[in-house]
Amino acid sequence: MTTLDLDFVRAQFPAFGHPEMGQWAHLENAGGSYCPSQVVDLLADLFAHAKCQPNWDFGPSVVATEAMDRSRAVMAELFAADEGEIHFGPSTSQNTYVLAKAMRPMWDDGDEIIVTGQDHEANQGAWRRLADTGIVVKEWAVDPETGLLDPADLDELITSRTRLLAVTHASNIAATINPIRTLADRVHAAGGHIVVDGVSYAPHGLPDVAALDCDVYLYSTYKTYGPHVGLMYTRRSLLEQMTNQGHYFKDTTPEGWLTPAGPDHAAIGSVAGIADYYDTLVAHHGIEGTTRRDRVASLFDAFAAHEAEITAPLVEMLIAHDRARLVGAPTADHAVRAPTVAFHLPGTTSASIYDALIAAKVSCGHGNFYAHRLVGSLGLDIDDGVVRVSAVHYNASDDIARACTVLDDVL
Ligand SMILES: Cc1ncc(COP(=O)(O)O)c(C=O)c1O
């Protein structure tokens, strides 16, 4: 197993050398990660030298086209998908909005969709709204104590009319990894599709859409070391059943059906910088593998080991405390949960704990993080919500230690 050279990793991120940003223990990564210079430089270069309409024959336009094509190609390579199965949109919330419109004509009135009470609203709201159009929407509810989903409960909800299960790979609060392949098998057996929100998983693990057998996989690259772009994999055979959401004259090529407007060209072009960053780490650590995907998957194994190791003291502190309520599975084991730690201390507001962390220069947040329904199901105040401390591979154990020192006091 490769051990991360953390100094080298952090040297890739201009934020850590910045006089203000460098002072913070950045543990609000589930809200947005920092960008490595491979992305920052590419974005700056595209804005400076190729900020024009792509697909023409003049020089800067050719550069813009090539940059966008490269992003699509490398992301397809990392997903082990075809290029036509990769779509870029402004955000995951907007991608699910478009998806719901594109898929609704596939279904009859009275057909059923299952959403979960654990998902961020991005993978609930657009689907729930289809109830207004004759679709029956069912909720797979969470355990109100832990915030976890029990796969056994899903069997009660699946019927011969189930058309879709919309579920998160790992919630942005409960952080626990859901067994997507098992869920996919169950929903496929009933003739339905599965749409997976990977926003809180993808910064920590390289999604394998073939092994997961998911029909749609979405994530937001601004939480995965890139620009503010929503990335979506859609299985080709499913895409072909959808309805074009682009201009009517773009109806001939399904690749454009899920992009209703002109996208942010430079931002999309800079998505390839994420793969460049991974390649830099792969080369530095001497990671070998036949394909780029294999090598990056091994790199993610190293990320996982590091993330679990640095997060363990915080998770263990919360588990050991008699009043603290950790949301999700009580472990730092990376095979079970992402290194996102959300908790609540009955009798103490999350806002006051957040204030203490901020005073110690720990970047974090508190509230519902748009997992509104989950926080409501946990019986918490929607606005005060939980305190969330979320790490990624570039965090040091000192970052977590700083948070633990504050929490030791507060708890
Ligand atoms: C798990 C999860 N899903 C979806 C979203 C929404 O992503 P976007 O901001 O790209 O719409 C977020 C954002 O916080 C999230 O954490």
Image: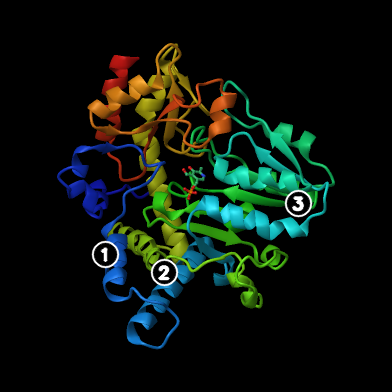
> Is residue 318 visible to us here?
yes
**Between residues 139 and 340, which one lies in front from this camera angle?**
139
| Dot 2 and dot 3 residues touching (CB under 8 Å) | no
Residue 177, located in which quarter of the rendered image? top right
Residue located beneath label 2 in the image: 265
Give how far across and how far down residue 268 sits, in percent: 42, 65
Q: What residue is at 79 percent from the left and 55 percent from the top?
A: 107
**Relative side of 70 to 404, left or right:** right
How many angstroms separate mark 1 from mark 2 (CA)? 15 Å
Q: Secondary structure at mark 2?
A: helix
Assign a secondary structure to mark 3. loop
Q: CA distance from mark 2 to mark 3?
A: 34 Å
The residue wearing badge 3 is: 192
Which residue is found at the position 23% from the left and 37% from the top?
24
The numbered disc on residue 344 is none
- Read off the residue under disc 1: 41
